[in-house]
Each structure stands twice: as C-alpha cells, then as structure tokens.
Amino acid sequence: MADFYCDHGAYATNLGATPTWGVPQEGDGSTKDAATASSVVSVDLTSITSNAGTFALFGSSAISVGAAASGATLATQIANAINASTVVTANATVFPGAPQIRNAFYARATGATLEIMCRVGSTATNILGLVWAGTWTAGPPANGTFSGGTGGCWGWLLNTAAIGVSSSYAALSYGIAVAASPLVSVSSASVVAKPTILDGVYVRTASGYTLTCAVNTSPNFGTPNYSHNLIFDSNTVWTGDSGTGVVTVSMSTTSVDIQLYLCPATGGQFKSIRCINKGALKFYWSSGSVGNFFIKPNSASGGWRKH
C-alpha cells in the first residue's frame, strides 16, 4: 500500500500557463507538500544542423523540428515545436495519463542551448527521455536524460475552468477526483504510477474552499480509469490546518437535471470517498425554475454501497 496526496491550489501557476523556469505546475502525488523543482534536460546545439530532423519526448511519436536550421535558430524552432505540440507522450510508466507534449513539458532557447523542463514535479527520470531521429547534416545531438526534479502533491481535485495550453483540458476533466492526468510515477518502490483502492489519496481540506461549477454542469467522479480511495483530511496529514475545513462542490441549474456520478464506469474498478471529519466534503446545488439533482453510480458500474 502507498499514500498519495492532493492539495488543491498548491501551485502558483495553472498547468499550461507559461511557468517560472524550473518551478513545477503540478506534482506526482508522492508527498503532502508541493513539488519544488522540475526535471530538466539541456542540449547544446551550437554545432548541430537539422535538415528535416525529428525528436521524441518520453516515448511520443516523432515531432518535426521545422525548417533546416542550426545553432540558436534551431534551438528556438525546437522549443516552439515542443510548446505547441499536441502529440501525446507514450511512456505509460512515467506518464500513464498520456498528456499532450505541450501540457507535460515547457521549452526555451538560451542562445544555442535548448532547455526543456517537465511541468510536473517528480523524481521520475527516463534514460531516453529525449530521443533524436530524422535527417541531420551535422549531428544529431546525443539522446538526453531528464534529472533534478522533486516529487510533490497533486494540485487539483478538479478544475472548474479550462486549463492546459490553449485550454486543452476542458472544465471538470482534470484532477484527482475526475481524471488526474498527467500522473507521474516517482523512483521509489513505495509509490506507484497509479493509486489503487488499497492506497489512500489524502485530500487537503485546509480552511475550506468552494469549487463552483459552471451553470448546468457537474463533475463525474467516476471518470478516472483506475480504482482509488479519496480521504478528505482534517488536521491529520496537514497538521497545521484548522481541522474544520470543508470542501464544497457547488452546482446550479436553470434548464437541466444535475447527474452527479460517483462510481467508475468500468467493471472491476472501485471508488471510495471518505472524510476524516464528518461533513468535510459537501455537494451544494441550487435550482432556478427547472432542474433536479441526482447522485448516481455510473450505469456500467454494477452494484454500489453507500456507507
């Protein structure tokens, strides 16, 4: 068994925004504190020339460098390609959530040096994290290894507004309660890439916060493609908190029914939601002239129990 942690709002910038260099925008769930350092790789392209060169990050399919170039121009081209790439990572060990390259990494050119950071803080590394291919008139560069990162808590219970580059994660599609992508494993035998129902995912209640969904929308807590056990903390893991904080998911309707699904839709998967302090998680609903509120299991989830 392993413990995982989520502290909603723990990171200074939203996933997908331009980050402060080397500062993570998300964590891997491995500790209760926020990740403080990103894994980084640097490549000196001073004497390297590309002619239809390609590269791959963490097992992704090939990403084109762009027009033939060398040195600082080449570094800028590759950084721009990374920051705009919708290609997904394919290394399920490090990125089991298969995020788009642009949401998992951020790159910059410092002169002729290409620098790439992981947006997600983790000690996970990949010996072939950056792999070059294609046609190069000088080179290609040596394959690169990411290093220097630290693990930390996940920063999202669920997103009530779109995040990610170009708002690529729609509202209510990202967070440990609904999707938790990207998940990143850490290089410790005690922490695995995905939680299981035997693991505890502790969620900080802090002094309380409210997540307000857009009108006529509601989250689906059953969407993660794995079993997990959410435990809403009250001054137990985060001992400096008041112990009376309440996480409120607020919904409202004007024209539709709210269908709040709590269980996974895949057979053989399970969901547990518990509170250390009674009432630490609340669902709030308000209605205009039309709309009803339903709490349901997903239609494909089979039997369920309420405790």
Image (cartoon, grey):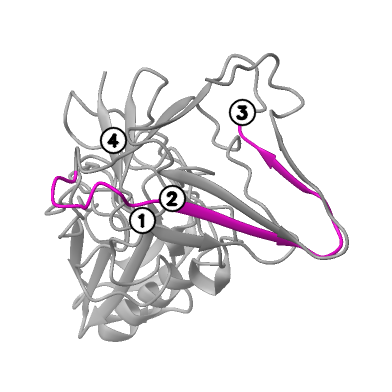
Q: Residue at x 19, y 68 (%)?
A: 22
Look at mark 3 in the image and give the residue it sits on: 264
Frontmost residue, 286 versus 188 = 286
Label 3 to label 1: alpha-carbon separation:
22 Å
Judge by depth and name the residue closer to the eye, 147 or 283.
283
Q: Which residue type does callout 1 highlight? A: His
Contact, mark 2 vs mark 3 (Cβ under 8 Å):
no
Secondary element under disc 3, as helix, strand or loop, is: loop
Residue bearing the label numbered 2:
157
Location of residue 161 in the rendering, given as x and y in whole percent from the top left corner = 56, 67
Q: CA distance from mark 4 to mark 2?
A: 13 Å
Residue 4: assigned label: 4
| Element marked by disc 2 | loop
Q: Find the distance from the CA under tag 3 to the CA under tag 4.
A: 19 Å
Residue 19 in percent (x, y) is at 30, 74
On residue 8, the disc is 1
Is residue 216 magenta-colored?
no
* Marks 3 and 1, the one that precedes in the sequence: 1
User: Which segment is the magenta one?
Assistant: 238-262
Q: Residue at x 22, y 37 (%)?
A: 186
Q: Amino acid at mark 4?
A: Phe
